[in-house]
Structures are given as C-alpha cells and as structure tokens.
Image (cartoon, rainbow, N blue to C red):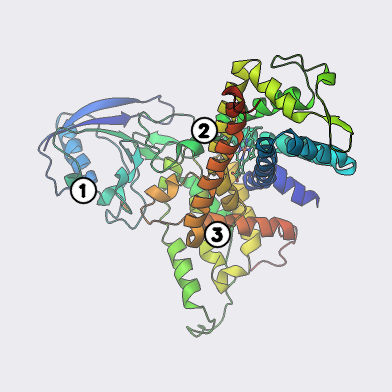
Amino acid sequence: MNLTLKVWRQKNASDTGRLVTYEAKNIIPDMSFLEMLDVVNEELMQKGEEPIAFDSDCREGICGTCSMVVNGTPHGGMKGTTVCQCHMRHFKDGDVIIIEPWRARAFPVLRDLVTDRSSFDRIIQAGGFVSVNTGGTPDGNAIPVPKTDADVAMDAAACIGCGACVAACKNASAMLFVAAKVSHLANLPQGRVERERRAIAMINQMDSEGFGNCTVTGSCEAVCPKEVSLDFIAQLNREYGKAILKNRMERKLAGGG
Amino acid sequence: MINLLKNLFCSSLGKKFIMAASGCVLFLFVVGHCVGNLQVFLGPEAINRYGAFLQGLEELLWPVRITLVTLVILHFWSASRLTLENRAARPVAYAEWNPTVASYASRTMFVGGSVIGCFIVYHILHYTALVNVGGGNFTSSAQFEWTNEHGEKIHDIYKMLIVGFSVKWWVSIFYIVAVGLLSLHVSHGAKAMLQSLGLKSKSYDPAVRCFAAAVAAFLFVGYSSIPLAIMLGFLK
Ligand code: HEM
Ligand code: FES
C-alpha cells in the first residue's frame, strides 16, 4: 500500500519546525507503524536526506519509549496499544497520515518526533524511597498482601511512563501518570509508610514541571496503552487531600532510610 | 494550618478541591433554586408566599447571600487560574488533534462558565437589585405589591416575573441560553466534582453519569420553562 505522510520535522529544540510531506511506498500491511517509518527513513538516507528522528526501544509495547501522535491521537488510537504495536493493516491504501511529537511544555521537542520526557523522571525522583529493612532476605510472604490489593496495585504499575496521557489531554496534564505511580505504592503495605509525603512531593514536582491540570475529560484513559484507569486519579485526589490535611510534609525525616 | 492553606491555594490539586467544593455547593443551590422557582406554576399565592418566607429568614438571608457570592468568586478564581495554567501547558498546538472521549461539555467549561458568571451578575441586577436592565420600569417597586391572605403587603414576585419576561423578548432568550449553558456546565461538573474530591469509582460510574445527565436535563427544562411559559402567554 502507498501512503502520504505529513511528518513534523524540527532540527533541534530552538528550531520552529514544520510539517513535511513524504510518500511511503510499497508498505506491507503486516509492518508495524515504526517499521513503516524505518522504510521511509531508509529511502531518505539513500537520497542523502536526514532521516526522521523518533524514539523506540523494545518495539513490543513494554518500555514506553515510542511516542508519536498519529492523526491527532497518541499511539495511533488502537485501544491499549503503543504505536510500535500498531500495525499498518489498520490503515487504507492512499491514506494521509499526520505524525506529530507529544506536545507539552514539560516535554520539549529535541528533534522531529523526539521529546525530552525527563520531567517524568524528576517526578519519580521526588516520590522518594520505599522503606525496606536491610538484613537477611525476608520471607516471601512475611507481609500479607490481599489479592485484591495486589491486583489494583498491579493495574497501576502497568503504566510504562510513555506520556501518551499528557499528549492526549487538552490541558497536557500528567495526572494519570502521577496517579498510577502514587496509587501503585499506596495500595501496597510496603509503599504505604510514605504515602502521604510521596503524594505531596510528586504533586509539587508535577506542578513545577509545568504540566496542566486534570479536567476529567477522560482522554488520557482512552489513549493509555496500558489502559490505566481514571479511578487512580480519584485515588490520587484522595491521597493528596488526606496528606495535606495531615500536613505530612512538615514532619522531618530523621536519619534517612 | 498555614501549610494547609498554602497547599489548597497554590497547588494544582488544591485549586481543584476549591473548584469542586464550591461547585458542589453551587450545584445544590441551583437545584434548590430551580425547585423553588417552579412554584410560579402554582400561581401568585404560592410563589409570593415562598418569596416572603425567604425574605423573612432575616438571620439567614445575608449569611447565605455572602456565602454564595464568596463561593462564586472562589470558583471563578480557581477556574481562571487553572485554565491559564492549562493553556500555558501546551504552547505549541497540534496540527491535528482528536478529542477522543473528551465531551463537548468538558471542553467548554471555562467559556460556558464565564457566560454563566456574566448571567449571574445580570440576574442579580434584574430580579434582586431591581435595576432596570430588562425594561419594564423595575426601579419603581411599588407596582410589585401583593396582599396575602392575612392582609399583609408582600413583594409580588409573580408579577415581577411576568413583567420581567414579557417586556423585552431578548431578556427571555438570554435567560434560556444562559440556563442551557448552565445545564451543559453541570452535566460535566457533576461528574468532575466527584472525581476531583476523590469520590468516584468505576463501580458506580454509570449511576453518576445518569445522575449528571438527569439533573442537567431537569435544570434546563425547569429553568427555561418559566420565561418560555411567560413569553408564550401561558402565565399571565
Ligand atoms: C462564575 C462562573 C463560572 C465559571 C467561570 C466556571 C468555570 C468552571 C470551570 C473552568 C470548571 C472546571 C471544569 C473541569 O474541571 O472540567 C468548573 C467546574 C465546575 N463548576 Fe463551574 N463555573 C462557573 C459557575 C458555576 C456555577 C454557577 C455552578 C453551579 C452549578 C458551577 C458548578 C461547577 C461544578 C460542580 C464543577 C466541577 C468541579 C470539578 O471540576 O471538580 N459552576 N467551573
Ligand atoms: S518501543 Fe517500547 S513500547 Fe513502543
């Protein structure tokens, strides 16, 4: 099949960037979206042109590195699918496909479709540690975890930190990401110890990175490749509300972990 | 305490709490106000007695008014701060953007809310302060006097409504448009406030959706029926 691509090209962070049109010829429907771009890049390189820069790593939907907005929808709009797992059979011969990077102040474009998502790393760092006792290896079941709690924590932990939630949100809000990380630990006994301090610290960091605010549109959940639920945002709101009432940032940590 | 206030007024989630909590009380108010107003269909006796009853609650009237105005101000303040932050969060727009499941109501909360805000000011000038903003010589309040069954002279709300909605057609249209926007706002707001206050969960999401849609429909039908009935001559 043959396609027309309109791809965002931007030399570096200070370049203004523009959409450039390319023809993608002889694309096999079984190719993934990224493989289709590989084919286009191959051709560009043969012509001596600069290939389209995009992020990818595992190409099996588990690392969260791939990141591009396809026709206005992050990851291409297949339910629960990263763009690396989105296949060309979902497109038709002759389609025009617009490809853009994640757009958010907190994710500056470095080049073409590659953005700097280290704001997510700083939010994780702000979350701090989980108290674990040193010493001998603890028995596997020493801390009882109810199955339902473990399941909920696992659903939150499914977040691969790709940033599609931010890209899809009309406000470029990172709430679904932060909610997944806060809820993941707050639902487990190991993470419960620091839950309040963690909620406040991660929200403060989220705010200072310049993400927008949640207005409960549900777009984040709709595009999340791991289908992380909006319920976790409700949990984050609860966690944060309780934490500021208890004023947990005030208590100083004595002597570290 | 200082920290709590700082977190509430400065953090993103704190401002969302303010917006949701103020929105929640305003929500209860607009539902109650609508039910109260519908008594106009029971005739002058009923609505005028209701009005006199509210006016008679002297110890409560001003505290309630001040609370409501404060809540509107807090709601508008947090909404505008959050909206400015949201716009700043995406400096470069997408060439193509698909709102996926984001509803029309959810995308027009600030614009719709601002029109509602202007409407609130107009409405208070019109029927509370009796400023002449809609025709009908409202400033001479002597024309709105009603003698109740005990022979007391009370405010004739019924006549005031009839005059207010029949002198200039555009007044009624403005009211109908404004309550339309209000019900759109509430159709999203009723769901959003539960989420912002951390009270929502998938297990009763369908019930919350039905509730929000039902209340929004009730508000629109309830509120717009009054100017509509007067314009069409059903109430005289
Ligand atoms: C002064 C005019 C108003 C403005 C500018 C305004 C603006 C807004 C905005 C921008 C939101 C956030 C939307 C979101 O988070 O998705 C909101 C939420 C809300 N508004 Fe208003 N609004 C106004 C008046 C009202 C009134 C009169 C009511 C009463 C029914 C109301 C009830 C709500 C509710 C319940 C919410 C949900 C709170 C939340 O998001 O958690 N608003 N408003
Ligand atoms: S490249 Fe790893 S998730 Fe797509």
Identify which amino acid the numbered label 2 is placed on: Thr
Instruction: Name the element at disc 1.
Output: loop
Residue at 18% x, 44% y: name it.
A88
Identify which amino acid the numbered label 1 is placed on: His
Examine the rendered structure and indicate whether residue B105 appears above or below residue A56.
above
Q: Which one is nearer the viewer's eye here, B230 or B22?
A: B230
Residue bearing mark 1: A87
Chain at numbered mark 2 = B
| Sequence-wise first label, 3 or 1 | 1
Q: Residues within 10 Å of mark 2 (few under 14, many from 20)?
A: some
Instruction: Name the element at disc 2.
Output: loop
Residue bearing mark 2: B108
Residues marked 2 and 3 touching at CB (< 8 Å): no
Distance from disc 2 to disc 1, alpha carbons, whole Å, reads 34 Å
Residue bearing mark 3: A182
Q: Nearer the viewer, mark 2 or mark 3?
A: 2
Instruction: Name the element at disc 3.
Output: helix
Q: Is residue A116 visible?
A: no
Q: Is circle 3 on the same chain as circle 1?
A: yes
Q: Nearer the viewer, mark 2 or mark 1?
A: 2
Horizontal and vertical percent position of residue A61: 31, 55
Q: CB at mark 1 closer than 8 A to ligand 2?
A: no
Determine whether, in the image, residue A30 is placed left or right of residue B236: left
Distance from disc 2 to disc 3, alpha carbons, whole Å, reads 30 Å
Q: Quadrant of the N terminus of chain A?
A: top left
Chain at numbered mark 3 = A
Query: Within the image, what quadrant is residue B136 found in?
Result: top right
Q: Is circle 2 on the same chain as circle 3?
A: no
Q: Is residue A62 visible?
A: yes
Determine whether, in the image, residue B29 is placed left or right of residue A209: right
Q: Residues within 10 Å of mark 1 (few under 14, many from 20)?
A: many
Query: Within the image, what quadrant is residue A215 found in?
Result: top right
